[in-house]
């Protein structure tokens, strides 16, 4: 009998869920509840019986999760028919405290609460999801899987910002990095595809989705990553600027009278591809740049150039590189971006074969030419399966 995990990802006004077989990765059902707390909300439930959409207000996360349970009862698969072993929660910020997934108890909740200053939007939402699920499934083990955990192997010279000691010690100001569950999954997949142990491999992994980041992985361990204390730093993203001069905040405040919240909002929600082109979806950017639209053309170039800069930097960090790996929505699908981002790196042994790059597959595939010094791969990420696997590893070892 399969071991199923209910994977929950609670946002401030949303709840994503997925019922996953932890061994095979088979997703028996999944869905989202959106606009929680607003006058009208929507639940999309996807199951073998089909796609169900229902609209009604959801007053809070508890109401939303109850509606999800009703969707399982009404449209299947029935939770009574599967062996549900755990609830796995995606928790965005684990600070410097959590480098592995943890069984949730009151002390863990308190610890995640204490990290709210580091993730003021995300961690309270994750806590809401945890509280709701604990109330609904009091007898089921619940596991927190942290997005930051994979990067706890960063050495001090990589995670330290050059700011005064009091900030670093008293306020935990440092680089943390995110997308950890994705990196953990994709690195293992890359090793499987290359037929070599992960502990032998140096990888540069590019997680390019709505959020985007790059990570240097040395012999299976993260040694540098482009996101910092928050997910704003690094690559250009759908609506986030990525790297800017930190003095920009003061400049905008002095010149335009913007508050810190204004700057925060603009750099997180109105910048990136959206700020450059008007579109936050890479498909739109790619389509309109091909028609010669200036904004989308610039957005494409800035996006690809920033990636190339990080690949060069992480090559220097690692010394030798076995593979460059593209993953997530943009990385897995945008062939034109992959070719542009890695162009001109032949002297580093990095090249993209046009024909291979233009292929599509549901399985990971190689896009570098035969005999290349550095393999270039496209690997489909699966954060839900990774959370399910990590949750089962905790539950298995606890049981
Ligand atoms: P993710 O955060 O990994 O779900 O990625 C979502 C993003 O992937 C979307 O906002 C799109 O910009 C991008 N995306 C999805 N499909 C495609 C595609 N076929 N071509 C280019 N970009 C895509």
Image (spheres, rainbow, N blue to C red):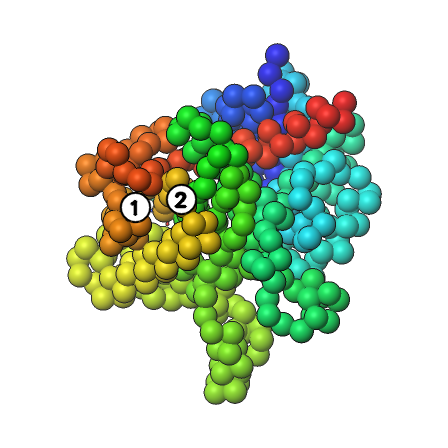
Q: Is residue 7 above or below residue 126?
A: above
At label 2, counting other C-alpha atoms closer than 10 Å, the crowd grade (few under 14, some 14-19, many 20 or more) is many
Q: Residue at x 75, y 38 (%)?
A: 104
Q: 390 left or right of 44?
A: right
Q: Is residue 273 above or below residue 207?
A: below
- Where residue 73 sits in the image (x, y, percent)? 61, 24
User: Camera-side residue: 164 or 304?
Assistant: 164
Q: 136 left or right of 372?
A: right
Q: Residue at x 39, y 40 (%)?
A: 322
Q: Residue at x 76, y 22 (%)?
A: 399
Q: Is residue 107 visible?
A: yes
- Where residue 236 sits in the image (x, y, percent)? 40, 60
Using the numbered discs, state the Cα–Cα distance from disc 2 to disc 1 in whole angstroms.
9 Å
Q: Is residue 217 above or below residue 314?
A: above
Q: Is residue 211 visible?
A: no
Q: Which residue is mark 2?
A: 321
Q: Which residue is mark 1?
A: 350
Q: Residue furthest bottom?
A: 255
Asked if the residue at tag 1 contacts the one at tag 2, i.e. Cβ–Cβ closer than 8 Å, the answer is yes
């Amino acid at each position: 009998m399969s071991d199923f995990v209910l994977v929950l990802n609670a946002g401030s006004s949303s709840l994503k869920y997925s019922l996953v077989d932890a061994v095979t990765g088979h997703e028996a059902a999944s869905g989202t509840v959106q606009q929680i707390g607003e006058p009208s909300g929507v639940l999309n439930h996807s199951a073998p019986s089909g796609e169900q959409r229902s609209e009604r207000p959801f007053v809070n996360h508890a109401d939303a999760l109850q509606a999800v349970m009703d969707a399982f009862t009404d449209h299947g698969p029935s939770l009574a028919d599967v062996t549900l072993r755990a609830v796995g929660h995606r928790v965005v910020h684990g600070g410097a405290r959590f480098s592995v997934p943890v069984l949730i108890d009151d002390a863990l909740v308190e610890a995640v609460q204490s990290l709210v200053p580091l993730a003021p939007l995300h961690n309270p939402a994750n806590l809401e999801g945890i509280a709701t699920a604990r109330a609904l499934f009091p007898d089921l083990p619940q596991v927190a899987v942290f997005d930051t955990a994979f990067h706890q192997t960063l050495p001090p010279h990589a995670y330290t910002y050059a700011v005064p000691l009091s900030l670093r010690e008293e306020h935990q100001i440092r680089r943390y990095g995110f997308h950890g569950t994705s990196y953990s999954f994709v690195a293992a997949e890359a090793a499987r595809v290359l037929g070599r142990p992960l502990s032998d491999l140096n990888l540069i992994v590019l997680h390019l989705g709505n959020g985007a980041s790059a990570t240097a992985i040395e012999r299976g361990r993260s040694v540098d990553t482009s996101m910092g204390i928050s997910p704003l730093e690094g690559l250009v993203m759908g609506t986030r600027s990525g790297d800017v001069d930190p003095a920009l905040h003061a400049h905008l405040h002095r010149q335009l009278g913007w508050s810190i919240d204004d700057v925060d909002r603009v750099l997180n929600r109105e910048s990136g591809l959206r700020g450059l082109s008007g579109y936050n979806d890479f498909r739109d950017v790619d389509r309109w740049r091909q028609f010669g639209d200036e904004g989308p053309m610039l957005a494409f170039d800035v996006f690809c150039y920033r990636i190339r800069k990080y690949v060069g930097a992480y090559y220097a960090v690692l010394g030798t590189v076995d593979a460059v790996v593209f993953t997530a929505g943009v990385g897995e699908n945008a062939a034109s971006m992959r070719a542009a981002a890695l162009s001109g790196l032949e002297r580093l042994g990095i090249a993209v074969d046009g024909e291979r790059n233009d292929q599509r597959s549901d399985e990971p595939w190689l896009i570098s030419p035969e005999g290349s010094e550095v393999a270039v791969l496209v690997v489909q990420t699966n954060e839900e399966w990774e959370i399910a696997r990590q949750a089962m590893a905790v539950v298995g070892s606890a049981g």
